[in-house]
Structures are given as C-alpha cells and as structure tokens.
Amino acid sequence: MVWTKRQMTLLVLSMTQWWTTTKVHVSGDESVRDQLHQLPDGRLKCDFASRLVMIANHQMYNDWVYLWWTAYTNQPSTHGHVYIVLKDSIKYIPIVGLGLRFAGFVFMSRKMKKDGPRLTRRMNQLTRRGPNGLAPMWLMMFPEGTNLSKNGRAKSVKWAGKQGTPDMRYQLIPRSTGTYFCLKALEGTLDWMYDCTLAYDGVPEGQYGQDVYTLSSTYIDGHPPPIHMHWRRFRVSDIPLMTLEEFDAWLQQRWLEKDELLEHHAKTGRFPSALGQGEHITTEVKLRGWWELWQFSVVLLLLTVAFWVAVIGGKKAV
C-alpha cells in the first residue's frame, strides 16, 4: 500500500505540474517556525513529525491534493503513509475513486453508527507496532465533513442556530465526533496535531471556490487557483480529550481562530506569518525531478507487460 500511494502521489503531482502551474504561498505561526523552509531551487521542505493527525478547513474538492503534496515535501517524505478521511461519495468518482480506495483512504458517511466500525479497523491498523515500532502516519481530516458551498453554508447556519454556537463566515461549523474518535484511538502513539488553514485567491465575496475553480478549469483549462496555506501545530497532550463536549469546545475555538485568519486573507490577500526572514514562502506544486515520473512510467509499463503476459498465457492454457 505504501508503494501504491507513492506512485499515486507522483501521478497526481505530475498531472498538476504538467497541466497547471500551481502557486502556493506558505505561512505559519511560531509553532512551526523551524519546520518550513525553502530550498535553493524554490521547492518547499517541511520538517513535520513522521506521525501526526492533520486537520484543515475544506474549501474545494481538491484540497486533499495540496495537503498530500505537503507530505511529499516532508523530510523524510511521508506521502506513502498518508491516510485521508473523505466523504463517502468521492469513492464513486470514476478512476480517481478507485485509486483512492486502493490507497487505503477512509470514506465516511457522517453517521457514526456506520462509520464507527470502519474507523475502528483503520485505527487498530495505525496503532499496530511492527518489528521497527510504529510506522509513519499522516492522518488527514476535514472536520467540516464537506467542502464549502452555498448549500453547506445554509446547513451550517441552521446547525449553529440549533446548537447555540457562533456561526462561521468563511467556513462551515466543524463536526467534532470523527476527529475526537480518531484522537482517542491514537492517544499515546503520536505527539502532534497539525492544523492547516486553506484559502484561494480570486474567489469573489459571496461565491465559493468550488464554483470558481472547478476540476475542469484547473486540470483541463489550466487555470489553477493561487493557494495560501497557513500552518500551526498543537501537542496532543494539551488537547482536552476527557469528553467529547470538552473537545468540541476546543475545536470550535480553533475554527473561530481560523475564520479570523481567513478574514485577514480576505482583506490583505495573504495570511499573517511568523516564519522569520521573508515570513512567507512562495513555491509551486512540482516533482523533485522528471526522473521520478520516469520511475513511475517504467513500473507501470512492467505491470502492463506482466498483465498481458498473464492474459495471453491464460488463453493459451485454455
């Protein structure tokens, strides 16, 4: 599965690099100041933990691509150890959905009665110790459950009124149950939760990124959105996990802070940053070198040849 994810990463990133030139503006607070760097050739280098839970706001369908790219830029690279929790409908997307299922991603219906058993199985796998201890793991989650849209905003407003909680302006209210479940199951096996706030330039007020930047406009027309990523991290030991209610209050507060970050981006065109030197890193989504794509192509060719040999051999045997 690790090999499969690595090859999928190379495929997705090569498509992104070949068909689009995707600019990414990276920032962060003091907690990640020494973990984000720009290499001499302009590429991003992250020094994040090898085992972590990552949460992010969900602006568009392809948010997960850019978060997966972050794992690719990590040293050592962890893109072969990424597990992304996505809504159930995505697994039915032709080709892409099948690939994501092969990669071992977790698909949620947002009904814990149904999701609980599959989450339990996955968490048991992620906490299993091998001969070399715990394997690297980046578990990525979108607590909002779905990407930002007109329909989603209406439901979020309704939910806020029902729960008596403050509504968000630039996001949806996060649901805490799934994230709490995973953190409790992983407790004692990781030290950090990372939080990424995502924003995209060029989205007019009152509109939504998914409508302005569609998959077609990004990958077929070659007009990707300029992306802004703001990073921070929290010690898992400092996150209240005694009860779901305590964790929910903690998560809601983090989302209010993210809304303030998004307000700052809306007004200034960028996130605040405390990375030092130039403060912000401007880079692109790209491979280390095209030789990586060649490696992927050779493996794909060998698998294709092996498949046809097996098919022809089977026919002759019959």
Image (cartoon, grey):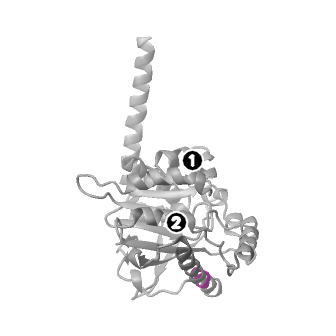
Which residue has dot 2 on it?
Answer: 179
For disc 1, the neighbor class at 10 Å (few under 14, some 14 to 19, many from 20) is some
Residue at the image point whose x is 51% and y is 49% from the top: 100
* Magenta range: 258-262
Residue 43 falls in image quadrant: bottom left
Q: Nearer the viewer, mark 1 or mark 2?
A: 2
- Circle 1 SS class: helix
187 sits left or right of 219 in the view:
left
Residue 127 is one of the magenta-drawn residues: no
Q: Position of residue 306 (x, y in %)?
A: 38, 30
**Three-letter code for the amino acid on which mark 1 is drawn:** Gly
Q: Distance between the Cα atoms at labels 1 and 2?
A: 22 Å
Disc with the residue nearer the chain's start (1 vs 2): 1
Residue in view at x 50 percent, y 58 percent: 84
Mark 2 lies on a secondary structure that is helix
Furthest residue to the front?
A: 243
Q: Is residue 21 visible?
A: no
Dot 2 amino acid type? Thr
Q: Position of residue 81 (x, y in %)?
A: 39, 56
As drawn, 243 above or below 299: below
Query: Nearest the camera: 174 or 60?
Result: 174
Where residue 70 appears, as percent x and y from the top left, is 44, 66
